[in-house]
Image (cartoon, grey):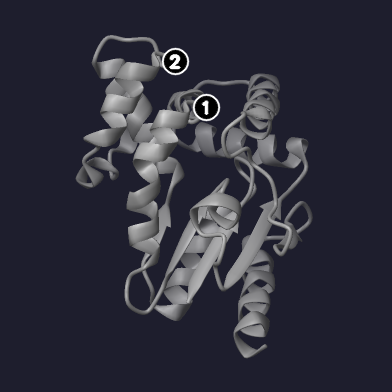
C-alpha cells in the first residue's frame, strides 16, 4: 500500500506520516528533506540557490545517507528547499528516487507537496493535510523556540505565507490537493486526534 500525505509547511503532515508508517510498519520518506539537502549542497558549492545548473547537479548526486543532518530541520533549510524546488531539473532528478522508495515491497508512506499529484498519482491512499497559516506559524515558532533559535512569530508567519505562495505558484508540480485526496484540516486538532483521523482515512480506503 502506498500512502501519499501532502500539505503545506507545519501542517502536521510529517508527524502524521511517521505515525501512520509506524502503525502499519512500513518505511516513511519525508521528501522535503531531499530538497532541503539539495539546497544545502548547492550553497556548499558557493552558488546561489536559484542557480539551476548547480542545483540540478547537486540533486543528481544527492547522498540519501546525509538526510539525517540536523541542519536540514532548521527554518533556513526550509526556505532553501522552497527555492530549489521551483527548478524543474531538480524535481526531475529526485523523482525516480521517490518513486523507487514508494515501490518497496509492502508499501511506504511519503509526505511532501506533490506526492498524490505527481510522484505517486496512483497511490492507494491520498491525504492532504492543512491548517490555517496562523496556526502553522504558531507551531513552527514554538518548534524553533524549542531549538533555541531566536525568531519572532511575525517573521515566521511571513515566511509561512511566502513559502505557501512559492510552493503553490511554481510552474512545475505546484502544491495542491489531488482530486481524489481526503482533506484533513488540523487547525483545531492535537497530534493524536490528527493521527486518528488520518488512520481512519487509510483504513476506510484499504477496506473499500
Relative vertical location of residue 49 with respect to residue 140 in this rendering, above or below: above
**Disc sitting over residue 54 in the figure:** none
Residue drawn at point x = 57 percent, y = 60 percent: 121
Q: Secondary structure at mark 1?
A: loop
Q: Is residue 16 visible?
A: no
Asked if marks 2 and 1 touch (Cβ < 8 Å), the reply is yes
For the image shown, how many numbered marks are present on the structure?
Answer: 2
The quadrant where residue 106 appears: bottom left
Relative vertical location of residue 138 with respect to residue 39 in this rendering, above or below: below
Mark 2 or 1, nearer chain start:
2
Relative vertical location of residue 193 with respect to residue 172 in this rendering, above or below: below
Q: Position of residue 71 (x, y in %)?
A: 34, 32
**Left or right of 120, for residue 27:** left
Q: Secondary structure at mark 2?
A: loop
Relative vertical location of residue 206 with respect to residue 152 in this rendering, above or below: below
The quadrant where residue 207 appears: bottom right
Name the one closer to the observer, 33 or 122: 122
The quadrant where residue 104 appears: bottom left
Q: Is residue 40 visible?
A: yes
Q: Position of residue 164 (x, y in %)?
A: 67, 32
What crowding class fits label 2: few (fewer than 14 Cα within 10 Å), some (14-19), or many (20 or more)? some
Residue drawn at point x = 59 percent, y = 37 percent: 140
- According to the picture, the residue beneath numbered tag 1 turns out to be 86
Name the one closer to the observer, 66 or 136: 66
In 3D space, how far apart are the residues under numbered discs 2 and 1 (Cα atoms)?
8 Å
Residue drawn at point x = 48 percent, y = 31 percent: 85
Q: Quadrant of the C terminus?
A: bottom right
Q: Position of residue 83 (x, y in %)?
A: 50, 23
**Disc sitting over residue 50 in the figure:** 2
Name the one closer to the observer, 71 or 128: 128
Amino acid at each position: 500500500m502506498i500512502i501519499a500525505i501532502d500539505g503545506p509547511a507545519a501542517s502536521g503532515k510529517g508527524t502524521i506520516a511517521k505515525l501512520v508508517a509506524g502503525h502499519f510498519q512500513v518505511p516513511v520518506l519525508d521528501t522535503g528533506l531531499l530538497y532541503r539537502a539539495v539546497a544545502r549542497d548547492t550553497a556548499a558549492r558557493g552558488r546561489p540557490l536559484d542557480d539551476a545548473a548547480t542545483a540540478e547537479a547537486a540533486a543528481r548526486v544527492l547522498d540519501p545517507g546525509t538526510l539525517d543532518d540536523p541542519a536540514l530541520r532548521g527554518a533556513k533549510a526550509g526556505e532553501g528547499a522552497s527555492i530549489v524546488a521551483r527548478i524543474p531539473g531538480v524535481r526531475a532528478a529526485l523523482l525516480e528516487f521517490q518513486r523507487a522508495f514508494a515501490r518497496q515491497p509492502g508499501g511506504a508512506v511519503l509526505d511532501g507537496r506533490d506526492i498524490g499529484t505527481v510522484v505517486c498519482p496512483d497511490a492507494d491512499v491520498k491525504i492532504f493535510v492543512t491548517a490555517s497559516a496562523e496556526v502553522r506559524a504558531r507551531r513552527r515558532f514554538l518548534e524553533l523556540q524549542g531549538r533555541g533559535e531566536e525568531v519572532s512569530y511575525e517573521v515566521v508567519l511571513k515566511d509561512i505565507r511566502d513559502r505557501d505562495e512559492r510552493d503553490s505558484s511554481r510552474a512545475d508540480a505546484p502544491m495542491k490537493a489531488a482530486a481524489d485526496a481526503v482533506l484533513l484540516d488540523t487547525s483545531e486538532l492535537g497530534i493524536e486526534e490528527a493521527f486518528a483521523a488520518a488512520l481512519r482515512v487509510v483504513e476506510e480506503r484499504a477496506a473499500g
